[in-house]
Amino acid sequence: MKVVIIGNNVAGTFTAQNIRYLNNEIEIEIFTQENYPYYTRVKLPELISKKVRIDDLIVFKDEWYKNKNLKLSLNKKVNKIDPNNKIIYIEGEKTPFSYDKLILALGSVPNIPPIKNASEMKTEKKGVFTLRSINDALEIRDYIKKFAVEKAIVIGGGLLGLELANQIKDYNLETTVVEFFPRLLPRQLDEECGTMLKEEVESRGIKVVLDAATQEILGNGRVTGIKLKDGQTLDADIVLIQAGIRPTIDLAKEVNIHTNKGIIVNEFLETSEKDIYAVGDCIEYKNQIWGIIPACMEQSKIAASSVLGLKKTDYKGTTPKNTLKIVGLELTSIGTIDPTKEEGGSWEILKKADKKDCCYQKLVLKDNKLKGAILFGENKAMPFVYNKMEEDVNRDELKKLLELYTYICSNCGMEYDEAKMDVLFKDLLQNFKCPECGAPKDEFKIKD
């Protein structure tokens, strides 16, 4: 049997690895339009600031593919699929390639919001860029050098946008982040932690503009700035758009494979066309797309089993989960982080907000089960959180994990439970007095 995979991203690469893990005999060939073997996108911003080299980004080099008997074909853009004859066509080549099973790991492309002049100026290389590949990073770096860029605007305050801003700032550029939503990282952080992050980002010399919709990219021959919908203009010599992703679906759509926002798959990652599967950023399952690495990894195992006819596990979706460094600080965000948006009651929150040390820890429970967490600036609780998601947990154990204490007034017995308060006891003003009896702060002791 011959399996062809289109796409050498995390989904395509790990699907190939998982197939090979299950079967040593079948032929596996990966086609990618990239110039490089599988590399991590997480550190692409560091390529711009020259903190890493291209070779540092490549995860699996040529030897890895040879050892696993995987044939990798670089610089090969697949421009047509013929499901009836089970062949694919490569741009610029007359001879098609056959397959028995086809896996679409087409990935995604950067989303460009409906901003006047944005798409045109990006296409014409007039100073508008997105960052998705090594080549993108090199183009951005070359543009900064060629035109002696001094001011940069990053549109998008998500994970990649903030890390990009951080690296651009390290390139000694005056940097501004413009975010459509009222807080940074709106998918990963609640309002309080988002405010804490904004203050930390601004302390590094990066300006942040929130609740700001970009209406137009300004400039003629080259970018000169942006105009917001409220009429405000911001100067810039380069504009970098990091406003989410769009699944790549054109190849599938052209041959009438069912698509919506993404390529529609069932619980076994099968598309509507027999012997064609899809995995990763390009898929849509139960009206949802993911675009996160944990989803790609989980889907790659199921796709590998399905291709080999071993339908032991079905896909149930992936709990949103991110662990990474953002502007040099550890961040883990997983599951439900803001229960005020969820239906039903019985939600409980344990929270530790240490603004002085830029540390925020929040655990979300429902019916004594751990449903979500934000760990920002301090990640030692991460292993516990990952192991206990959706399981019953003990509240006292969680308090101990977060180093939250209950202080008791030795005069009247009034309790100050840090898990329920917005301010840690140590951060209370020295003139704090017991609300019940007026005893001074030093009358409080940690409750055993």
Image (spheres, helix red, strand yellow):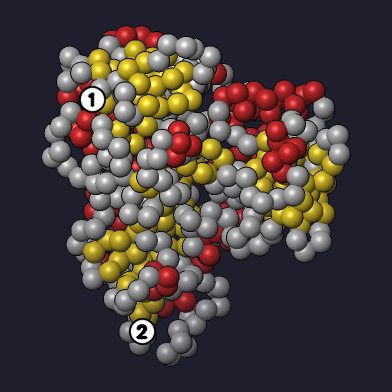
75 and 406: which is toward the camera: 75
| Residue at position x 70%, y 50% in the image | 115
- Residue 377 at what x, y percent from top left? 48, 49
- Residue 180 at what x, y percent from top left? 63, 57
Q: Which secondary structure, mark 1?
A: helix
Badge 1 amino acid: Ile
Q: Which residue is mark 1?
A: 19
- Residue 417 at what x, y percent from top left? 37, 74
Badge 2 amino acid: Met
* Earlier residue among tags 2 and 1: 1
Q: Is residue 193 left or right of residue 219?
A: left
Whether residue 323 is visible to the viewer of this picture, yes or no, is no
Outermost bottom residue: 437
Outermost front residue: 84
- Report the number of numbered marks: 2
Q: Quadrant of the C terminus?
A: bottom left
Q: Which residue is mark 2?
A: 414
| Residue at position x 13%, y 40% in the image | 312
Q: Is residue 313 left or right of residue 340?
A: left
| Residue at position x 39%, y 32% in the image | 105
Q: Which secondary structure, mark 2?
A: loop
Q: Which quadrant of the figure has residue 17?
A: top left
